[in-house]
Image (spheres, rainbow, N blue to C red):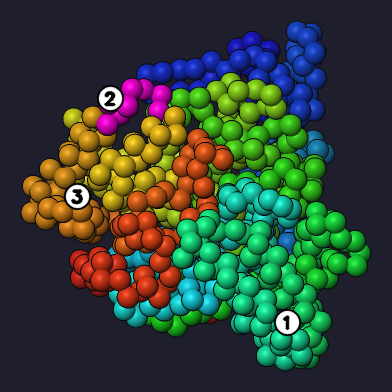
Amino acid sequence: MDDLARLAALHGIATSYRPAPDVTVEVPEATITTILGLLGVVTDDAESIRVSARSAAESAAGRLLPPTVVLWQGEPVPPLPAGLPPGSRVVVVAEESGEELAWGPGLPLGVHRITAEAPDGRTAGATLVVAPERAPAAPERAHGLLVQLYSLLSERSWGMGDLGDLAELARWAARTHGADFIQVNPLHAALPGTPTDPSPYRPSSRRFPDPVHLRIEDVPEYADCPERQALAELASRGAALRHEVLEKGALIDRDAVWALKRQALELLYAVPRTPEREADYRAFCAQGGASLDLHAGRQASRTGEDPKARTDFHRWLVWLTDGQLVAAQCAALGAGMTVGIVHDLAVGVHPDGSDAAEPALHARHISVGAPPDAFNARGQDWGLPPWRPDVLAGTGYAAFRALLRGVFRYAGALRIDHVMGLFRLWWIPEGTPPAEGTYVCHDGEAMLAVLVLEAHRAGAPVIGEDLGTVEPRVRRELARRGVLGTSVLWFERDWAGDGGPLAPEAWRADCLATVTTHDLPPTAAKLAGGHVELRDRLGLLTRPADLERAEDAADTAEWLALLDGLGLDTKGEEAAVQALYAFLLRTPARLVGVWLPDAVGDRRPQNLPGTWDQYPNWRLPVADASGRPLTLEELMASPRANALLSAVREGAVPRTAPPGARGV
């Protein structure tokens, strides 16, 4: 191995990767040296690379402990942590209580501090994570809905779906159709400014939620606000925004919605809180600590406000939103759901967001994305700065732990977008094409242990979005630790055999199974080939349109033939959609998710990868088969929606709550 390759390996940087079992791609040397340089490693010339490699190797060889030591409860505990020489002395101190603990079996779950002294006098310290063997289990069989919350407008919402709408959808889905969960898009805080980036996957903060989702009328201070006329006027303007979307075909305008809600919230902020509410708010601020203060101050400064004067207002907004998120989960469980609201954790944050305001933690001049694959020949650049693995590990994964703990406050389960990022992420140096990036590794075991520990504390199952290029070992480790995968029908083929559609009994059990996702065409569009026509109109096809149509039609025909062979009725669009979901219920998948737009025949994808201003990504309301936007009330009364969801309920095996499930 040459010096550069050895140096890269010591910093977790791949010098080659395998997009397929029989294909190896070499990473450009410039990419490797650039990333090393951004991590503070000198790589100016061959001699400096040689010196850096020797220094890094000597440092690694002399290290007594890794930054984080992991123990899995129920598994054998070695006499000493790996790497320590015989005769070393080990002391464990519980981080939360300060109690000194003995190394060995019986160490309690949690994050602790370990110190070691070798016989030669060398000392070292590390973080110790003691995690359960597995994350909390999902029900043996459960079904639910998948929806982008902003797209779900009720007759009460102000131009986009809100948390009141989410609670109402949960009650209807549970009581009428026995649904166990509703999975929503990330509800993280967006980056302030106009226009706001509409993507929920590029937030300002993943740690704190976005107040644009608040139901204004459900804020307790609303009833005591003396400015009732002003609030009524704002509500009327909110209704006008809703009317523009539902009746005139306008796109969802998040900025306009927030402008109105912001004015209303300024009025409510001036209303004195009850002593009980004030105490709850102060406790919330104390728990949020410096991270909450940083976020609130950053959000204020991004909107041109004086952070010193306005930080408390933005802290208060987070508190209100957190409260309504908890209330939505309570509504879901109260209506009979076994899981409740499944929240989505985005893979990263906007480079100008509040989370990225900690420069030491994030790699600068780097973006994460994905290498070229069958769906994106040029690769993808998501514009998200990654965490530095060395800094994250050196701080005992404190930022990751705080992030998870915050989201788990109100989540019945958690979906991890691009779950492979726990192990490695595709780094792209600034100014470099996505295809010329490379993988940079995390300590996957430590990341997974932190995730499983926090999920256990919350009593919440975890779903990993493991679509795309995934190392086999990653799926094995996730499954071993009880993290469910994601299986999308159109991608499930017998790749080890004839390549045809995968028979239902051959599907994995530990997954969320669905027909489509927010990044794929709704099922009605897929059946009719409408998504190919859409991409052709927008100039997104990389091959002749006739070839794309023919291949897509053949793919769909293969699936319909399999369904026909199983005795499922596929004659007509509605019947075919029902048959596809009936097929999912014949698999052993623990969770089956219905894409809510499929229930009403919506043909428009919520997001069209590879587009920016060519398509209204993240701004479309749920619509019927003719493209007419529907209110939540119309959706709940839709014969087509009720027929599909009733069929799914009838085909589902009776469910039980997962062991250790948490009530609210």
Residue at (54%, 19%) from the top-left corner? Answer: 16
Whether residue 594 can be seen here: no
Give the residue pinned by disc 1.
230
How far apart are labels 2 and 3 at the CA level?
32 Å
Numbered tag placed on residue 547 in the rendering: 2
Please tell me in which quadrant of the rendered image residue 612 appears: top right
- Secondary structure, mark 3, is helix
Q: Amino acid at mark 1?
A: Ala
Q: Position of residue 367 (x, y in %)?
A: 65, 34
Vertical relation: 1 (above or below) 62: above
Quarter of the image with the N terminus in it? top right
The range drawn in magenta is 541-549
Camera-side mark, 2 or 1 = 1
Q: Amino acid at mark 2?
A: Leu
Residue at (80%, 42%) from the top-left corner? Answer: 360
Please tell me in which quadrant of the rendered image residue 147 appears: bottom left
- Secondary structure, mark 2, is helix
Q: Residues within 10 Å of mark 1 (few under 14, many from 20)?
A: some
Numbered tag placed on residue 505 in the rendering: 3
Q: Residues within 10 Å of mark 2 (few under 14, many from 20)?
A: few
